[in-house]
Image: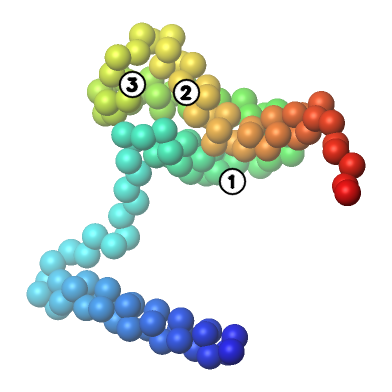
Amino acid sequence: MKKYLLMMCAMLMAVVSAFAAEPMLAAQAVGEVSEVSEIVIDLGSFTGIVACISMIVTQILKVVPSISGSKLAKIGVSCGVGMVICILAWLMQLTPILAGYQWWGVLIYGVAAGLSGCGFYDVIKAIAGLFKEEEPEV
């Protein structure tokens, strides 16, 4: 049964990919430039800002390998990049989310986005687990 289900999913994916590739191939045949290779990050949401921060921090960590060894350095770089991204987006009015904030509110938003982009949630969850009482299993 599992093999049958796997085979049906594979066939479905093959059909869907064939239909998805057809407009792209037709556009390339006409001579139009394909826009498949572009990276589009929507800064209009918190998730888009976090994705942009995460992408930039990853590239910084590749360029400066000494930061990769220290978790605090990663958090600091991520917060710094978050603040810079949010301030730039606020100054250029790229995102409606930051439109009503003062400059210090944008910095706090950038720190929160930076912490979220570097996986700070996992650290908070681990610390919260220390204070949570474990219930005995019945």
Q: Which mark is residue 98?
A: 3
Please give the residue where the numbered disc 2 appears in the rendered image: 110
The image quadrant where one finds the N terminus is bottom right
- The local secondary structure at tag 2 comes to helix
- Residue 65: where, in percent of width, then height? 66, 42
- Residue 108: where, in percent of width, then height? 49, 16
Q: Nearer the viewer, residue 99 or 63?
A: 99
User: What type is the residue that disc 2 sits on?
Assistant: Gly
Q: Is residue 3 left or right of residue 99?
A: right
Compared to residue 127, the image places residue 20 above or below, namely below
- Residue visible at 88% across and 47% down in the picture: 137
Q: In this view, does 33 lie to the left or right of 46?
A: left
Compared to residue 60, the image places residue 137 above or below, namely below
- Residue 133: where, in percent of width, then height? 84, 31
Q: Which mark is residue 62?
A: 1
Q: Which is closer to the viewer, label 1 or label 2?
A: 2
Compared to residue 127, the image places residue 107 above or below, namely above
Please count the marks in the image. Answer: 3
- Residue visible at 89% across and 42% down in the picture: 136
- Residue 33: where, in percent of width, then height? 18, 64
The earlier-in-sequence mark between 1 and 2 is 1
Q: Which of 18 and 9 is in front in this view?
A: 9
The earlier-in-sequence mark between 2 and 3 is 3
User: What type is the residue that disc 1 sits on?
Assistant: Lys
Q: Within 10 Å of the Cα at label 1, are there few (<14), some (14-19), or many (20+) other Cα atoms?
A: few
